[in-house]
Image: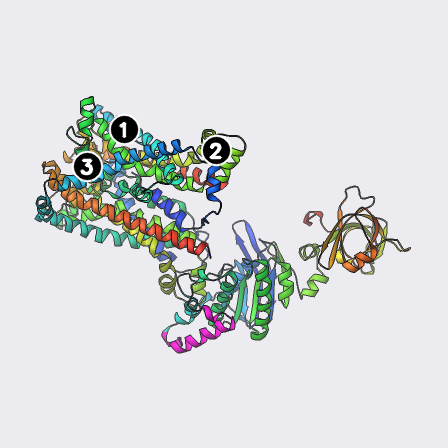
Amino acid sequence: MSSFKQYSILPGFNLALGFTLLYLSLIVLIPLSAAFIRTAELTWPEFWSIATTPRVLASYRLTFGASFAAATVNAFFGLLVAWVLVRYHFPGKKIVDALVDLPFALPTAVAGIALTALYAGNGWIGQFLEPLGIKVAFTPLGIFVALTFIGLPFVVRTVQPVLEDIETELEEAAATLGANRWQTFTRVIFPALYPALMTGFALAFARAIGEYGSVIFIAGNMPMISEITPLLIITKLEQYDYAGATALSVVMLVISFTLLLIINLLQWWSRRRSMQA
Amino acid sequence: MVEPAPQHASLRTIMTTTITFPLAGKTFRQRATQEPVWVRRSLIGLALVFLTLFLFVPLISVFYEALKKGMEVYVAAITDPDAVSAIKLTLLVAAIAVPLNLIFGIAAAWAIAKFEFRGKNLLITLIDLPFSVSPVVSGLIYVLVFGLQGWLGPWLAEHDLKIIFAVPGIVLATVFVTVPFIARELIPLMQAQGTEEEEAAVVLGASGWQTFYHVTLPNIKWGLLYGAILCNARAMGEFGAVSVVSGHIRGSTNTMPLHVEILYNEYNFAAAFAVASLLALLALVTLALKTLIEFRNKQHQKQRGLE
Amino acid sequence: MSIEVISLSKQFGTFTALHDVSLQVHSGELLALLGPSGSGKTTLLRVIAGLETADSGQVLFHGEDATDQHVRDRQVGFVFQHYALFRNMTIFQNVAFGLNVRPKKFRPSKEEIHDRVMKLLHLVQLDWLADRYPHQLSGGQRQRIALARALAVEPKVLLLDEPFGALDAKVRKELRSWLRRLHDDMHITSVFVTHDQEEALEVADRVVVMNEGRIEQVGTPDEVYDQPANPFVYEFLGNVNLFHSRLHRGRAWIGDLEVDVPEHAEAEELVAIAYVRPHEIEVERTQNGEAALAAQIVHILSVGPIVRLELVRENDKERHPVHAEISKERFRELQLTKGEKVFIKPRRLDLFPNYPQSQLKH
């Protein structure tokens, strides 16, 4: 018996694992490695100069800044929505609960044009903001709005199950020990939710970094001002600057994988927390 | 970008072990640990205002904008030959991508959930990888492999085969971004179900296929359907990755989301929203089916938990 | 059909589940594998079934080597700990499964299958549940269906993994005697795993006591209970009192009490552990001129027809409790009350000289 796999009487391991590895290699691993291998054709100074031109740096700042802001807003409102959905009853709750996943299900291009129409100067929402001097569509603020939309379900859906599992006994214990509601929330409930909240935040952030479809319609896409990194990759590609596009995509891949690692660690932490509880 | 870990998490809690009995003393219990009415109402109000602004209004606006110019314009937009060919292509792409990932999901989940082997966690992470890749990058990597400048580009050109800026490229990019959906639903589900039933079947003399067909498949069919629905929604709605590899050739390599973009950029808003409304409808149907399956699982769990 | 197990060893990583285990299961007997969790009993059962492979050793069925035979070909019936009923099939379909998956040439006709399944359901007294689903059944009913399903393929050997483990006390008792009766009727060679000594002693023809991957003792229930081979078996089977004693040329001393132990005539100045079962301790109000240990009653617990006394020996500074069980009549006769001084004397004891202290539970 090999030490690679424990004995089992169930059949099909070799077939299933073989197919899985073949499929993953062909569809995911080999194409992904292409980005790294093509980038390796560049020298380090070449790579560095491509990845740090002022226009590219501006796109990083915008992408990260807007993603961070959107994820932060989502952390706050996501927690609120999860709390309200788990703890309170109100008419239409089931429908609201189901619609929270809309940003997962709605194609990003549709979200993009809808948000643009809403926040344009003559749009339903934009018409009220314009007189106040607030321009949303075709500005970085618009990017923030789009990223908030697409990141909304992440925090809600990671916090919700954890909140459902918190035993009321814990809160009752706090109450019998003399804590008021606010103290109970900040000292008992919030610490239990914290890992899940961080996971949700990281998921929303990671999604926002790579987002393209919902952003490009509302962003205005002005170099140095409202141009996100994914768009810059496409722009380079359309100018047949393959080296530039590939180098930027490697930067994005490295960031994504780092975030993936962080998310895995957070989830591991979250699971451990909830198991100890 | 990282996709729906949460849905997956909520499904897991529903489908696996946690059995919540309706607490007899719940109403009495909650009183000691509940906020004052005004706090509750304000929190509900604030949450609903936020959701209304960011979710409901955008959703409604899609349909409003689509029908603003009347039913005729709407019907004309979605029966336009280019729109029809975009719809057909979208359906075709989904019809290839979903079954492929379905087979992959079953194979991966069978290997991962029913056997113990080294490197399993690494494999699970690899399956999740496409969720964390930006859609634009997902498209680009296929250009690097199959494009004219790519590894196989010259060979493909020689043999007059076109993958990038053609349907095969669109299919590949779509398959890439939807790889994890079904596998991630099935893995935790099948792990929770364990191997005892399959072992019992084999001891009773069933062959591998008989075991899978008679024992495993019926137990995972709802998880399978759930994953397939989410996978389908993403496959039909994918924009970034497909946009990179499609070439935007009207009537030939345009999917519905790409067609929406073209119409929008041509300031043909009514038509753009008309096609978008079909995609929004797809999203709503997806959510409805998803909710239905979750509801069914909860009922099922309750029924089994209370015997 | 007889089963023979020859020096099986099995390692899970650094954990030794089976350590050179050999065992003979006679044709038609009902054998219990008894031991604490982690003792290797379930692994042994699964290796016999073919659900696991051993690292080394052999399994013979009826004298023929079955070590490399696939579980499908071993013709064993296996009852899983959590029943493993197919949740998507009715009870009838569950029991019929093993027959339905046979290749066409070996598959009985539809009518035959129906008859056989109904007969089995009748045997386990659950024919009225044929159209239900597993989740609609109680634990005890599911267990009986699991058994019927295993029997449907007419196995040569029946293997049961903790068959009553997941049931509540009352159902356990009922099912136990039911299984015993069923076995008496069918006489199929059966092996079951349990961690419950009462269950093993009550149901099995023979009991195999296992610990840390080894077999400690094999014997009839009376043998293992009355003549435990070593301290582990003693402590695992039933309550027991432990006394430290000195042993010298056929005589042992526990405190002031001197006892004849002719079987240890050769012993020279040894330290030994003495085991006495609570019901083998005699309690007297007076010493009657015989050798006895003085003790004080610290607790009295009356359970049905039996009274349990907790005592502490005089001069025992560590105050180790000594447990004694006497009948209610005897208790009334003696008119004992808490705090009183009495004399105790073991009616029977077993001595284990030089047993390493680290192996003991207390």
- For marks 1 and 2 on the same chain, the one whose residue lies earlier in the sequence: 1
Helix, strand or loop status at disc 2: helix
> What amino acid type should be assigned to the residue bearing mark 3?
Ala
Q: Going 35% across and 57% down the picture, which residue do you hit?
A: A15
Q: Residues within 10 Å of mark 1 (few under 14, many from 20)?
A: many
Badge 1 is on which residue? A66
Which of the two discs, 3 and 2, labels the residue nearer the N terminus? 3
State the mark number for residue A114: 3
Q: Residue furthest right?
A: C289
User: Which residue is found at the position 33% from the left and 38% from the top?
Assistant: A154
Residue type at numbered disc 2: Val
Q: Find residue B205 and report its horizontal and vertical position in percent.
A: 43, 68
Residue C322 position in % (x across, y down): 76, 50
Q: Position of residue C240 (x, y in %)?
A: 72, 54
Please determine if labels 1 and 3 lie on a single subunit: yes
Q: Is residue A73 above or below residue B22?
A: above
Give the label, 1 or 3, closer to the camera: 3
Q: Is residue C230 left or right of residue B56?
A: right
Magenta span: chief secondary structure: helix
Dot 3 crowding, Cα within 10 Å, few <14, some 14–19, many 20+:
many
Residue at 69% in and 54% down: C235
Whether C316 is among the magenta residues is no
Choose top left, top right, bottom left or bottom right for residue C96. bottom left
Q: Is residue A135 visible?
A: no
Magenta part of the chain: C104-130
Which residue is denoted by mark 2 in the rendering?
Answer: A188
Image coordinates of residue C119 in percent, x first then y, are 48, 75
Question: Which chain hosts label 2?
Answer: A
Question: How many angstroms separate mark 1 from mark 3 (CA)?
Answer: 19 Å
Whether B273 is drawn above or below B227: the answer is above
- For marks 1 and 3, the one nearer the N-term is 1
Q: CA distance from mark 1 to mark 2?
A: 32 Å
